[in-house]
Image (spheres, grey):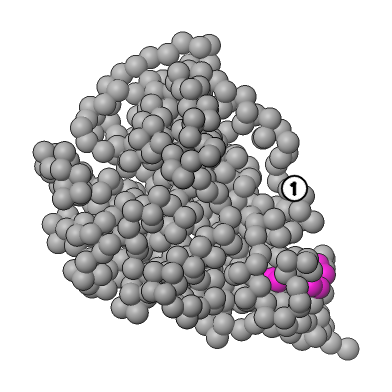
Amino acid sequence: MNEHEHVDILIEHGCVITMDPARRVIDDGAVAVKGDRIVAVGETSELARRYRAARVIDARRKAVLPGLIDAHAHAGHAMLRTIGGADGDAWTAACEAIYTSASDEAFWETESHLAALERLKAGVTTGVSLLGGGDSIMRVDDPVYARRHCDAVVRTGTRSIVAVGPSRPPAPRPYTRHGASGNSETYDVDFERMFDVCKDIVDACHGDADGRIQIALMLPVFAPEHYPEVAQYEDDYRREAQRYMSMARERNLSFTQDGHRAGTLDFAHRELGLLNAKSFMSHAIDLTEADIAACVETGASIVHNPSAIMSIIGRCPVPELIDAGVTVAIGSDGAAPDRGYDMFRHMWQCMHYHRRHFRDPDVLPHGKVLEMVTIDAARALSLDHELGSLEAGKQADIILVDLFKPHLMPMNMPVYRVTCFANAGDVCMTMVGGKILMEDYRVLSVEEGEILERVSQVADSTFERAGLRHLLDAPRTLWGHSHY
């Protein structure tokens, strides 16, 4: 009689899209999980003979995938997705006002709960979140805001790479702290204080929750050819680049930037020394040959955000980067002002965006865009040894996508169905590190209704405190016009 090896969970009879080096798609496949790790992936008949599981999950008519990875987004944005209409300047100004002056600890914790919940339900098990945004305005006057963000992610159960760094020059700039009793204090924060806060965040949070929380460092992009007003602050950019890259090397941290454009990657490499194999740079529109060469030379990765406003004003040359050997991941760019954390949407938009540019439907095969939210994204974040594919020894971050739905029929060509026709609402189970966080569409790790009720309360108080309620009014040109 054969001895069975005991495992905790056996997912069987699913269509397993492994994303392993052979890119196996196993029609009647199974995944065995013990503790937080995958121990085997193969045919159901084979694994059922080898393993006895405490829990068996029937994945019939479902796709079994590695958890999706969102390689670029912004903490804070999920609370601000409805404000400003189409007025980009008003949106950016609102971000600056809220992130520096009108947000309190409750804002950052509640927003993190909301974003983590949305990602969890969409099958996004790992996400990058810059601690702020709105053109590089970061909440780094006190480490407590990053701590609140991380605490909410830990309770939700997903993974987060939290990117912290200084706000863009000039500095000092005013920040306001709000107390629980309603009192507030405004004070100036210079680059020294921002650096010390970022160091404290690394010390307190990096590696938290058995590694589910990681801290990356970031800096605003120096782009005087695109934004001439920043040229006067070149010394600040050079000084901060040296300090933050030194910390990144000492602590073996990843590094990212938000908003690269033509010529800025080449400058960041040659003049600032910011590109290396642990760098992942976002947007990267209208790149020059020198920009692409800098990525090839250093091993830096690019994060493409096809649904972002930056991808309206310019194009990230994704096919050209891939052909040059550069790793390219997909990011959501956060949940605002006009998008969300549905990585299925972003895969679809990525394909059509570049096919329309080249007027060629053969650009970006379906398998490639799935790689860009799984194994390629893991590689861009220097996590491909742990995440991004279903392989023995890797973390058991696994999602099930229900394929037995009208918009996903007939039951053939699973990779095409996942990349072209599925959406976040089709994810029916999400597991992170061997722990089931959502099953049969029901979130198990947190009380979803309580979070949503809290979001409305905190958002209302934040808009009131910021004096920005007028940004919730519909623009007068919403109806009946061809342009805002």
- Please report the residue visible at 64 percent of the width from the left and 52 percent of the height from the top: 120
The quarter of the displayed image where residue 305 is located: bottom left
The relative height of residue 100 versus residue 407 in the rendered view (above or below) is: above
Q: Secondary structure at mark 1?
A: loop
Q: Dot 1: few (<14), some (14–19), or many (≥20) neighbours within 10 Å?
A: some
The relative height of residue 412 versus residue 337 in the rendered view (above or below) is: below
Amino acid under disc 1: Leu
Question: Residue at label 1?
Answer: 444
Residue 343 % position (x, y): 56, 59
State left or right for residue 168 relative to residue 28. Answer: left
Q: Which residues are magenta?
A: 57-64
State left or right for residue 129 relative to residue 126. Answer: left
Foreground of the two, 95 or 198? 95
Residue 454 % position (x, y): 65, 29
Is any atom of residue 470 visible in this view? yes
The relative height of residue 216 versus residue 89 in the rendered view (above or below) is: below
